[in-house]
Image: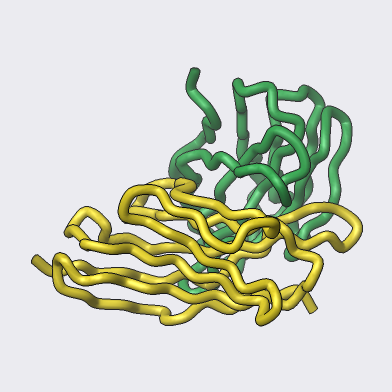
Amino acid sequence: NAGVTQTPKFRVLKTGQSMTLLCAQDMNHEYMYWYRQDPGMGLRLIHYSVGEGTTAKGEVPDGYNVSRLKKQNFLLGLESAAPSQTSVYFCASSYEGGGNQPQHFGDGTRLSIL
Amino acid sequence: GENVEQHPSTLSVQEGDSAVIKCTYSDSASNYFPWYKQELGKRPQLIIDIRSNVGEKKDQRIAVTLNKTAKHFSLHITETQPEDSAVYFCAASFSGGYNKLIFGAGTRLAVHP
């Protein structure tokens, strides 16, 4: 049981490039989330999903897109990377409504945009 | 708007002392309050949580208290040890159309031997 797995762990991009971050969970959780973590700002919700085939915007969705084609996977895409998107990205999952159940986090992806 | 404020931002204690971190939230409908510990370069890990139907919860050296009237909750760590050194995040659930967690900005705790 690996829990929540994120790939890649590190990536350096040039401004304007695109990439996809992958999150996979093996706990059969319905809810999945993408956060970004910046110094002094805690964790901010980018997008989330309440089940296979669904996605919704969080606090800071601009510049990102997501897809949940399979229940176990949640993809975060950057179509045209900007330096302001340099951050550590965490994926999380929870059994049901994240407000009432613990969220389990992956190890994070450290992304630098030059 | 939805907001969680966390204080202090940094906390330094001597080994064996107690540490207290406080958070306030804005949504009176919040009903779930988890605390996460994040060691350097690692993932946030849940250490304790509390729901709105209880005022206090303990787990060995860690306790959380909740005051719904004042809309604040606190993490208490007793007999601190160097391995308690980490960043601690509080969070509160918000109902606004769907359940989500809003996180505080974090407290960096340093426990000195």
- Viewer-proximal residue, B60 or B46? B60
Quarter of the image where the C terminus of chain B is located: bottom left
- Residue drawn at 38 percent across, 63 percent down: B87
State the image coordinates of residue A104 (x, y, percent, origin top left). 56, 39
Regarding residue A11, the answer to whether it shows in the image is no
Colour in which chain B is drawn: yellow
Quarter occupied by residue B3: bottom right
Quarter of the image where the N terminus of chain B is located: bottom right
Instruction: From this view, report whether residue A83 is shown above or below residue B23.
Output: above
- Residue drawn at 70 percent across, 28 percent down: A29
Left or right: A45, with B60 as reference point:
right
- Residue drawn at 70 percent across, 78 percent down: B69
- Viewer-proximal residue, B20 or A86? B20
Instruction: From this view, report whether residue A37 is shown above or below residue B99.
Output: below
Which residue of the protein is positioned furthest toward the left in this rendering? B113
Which chain is drawn using green? A
Instruction: From this view, report whether residue B67 is shown above or below residue A110.
Output: below
Which residue of the protein is positioned furthest toward the top in this rendering? A1
Left or right: A92, with A48 as reference point:
left
State the image coordinates of residue B93 (x, y, percent, origin top left). 71, 59
- Viewer-proximal residue, B94 or B60? B60
- The colour scheme used to paint the residues is by chain
State the image coordinates of residue B105 (x, y, percent, origin top left). 52, 72
Regarding residue B73, the answer to whether it shows in the image is yes
- Viewer-proximal residue, B73 or B36? B73
Left or right: B24, with B30 as reference point:
left
Q: How many marks?
A: 0
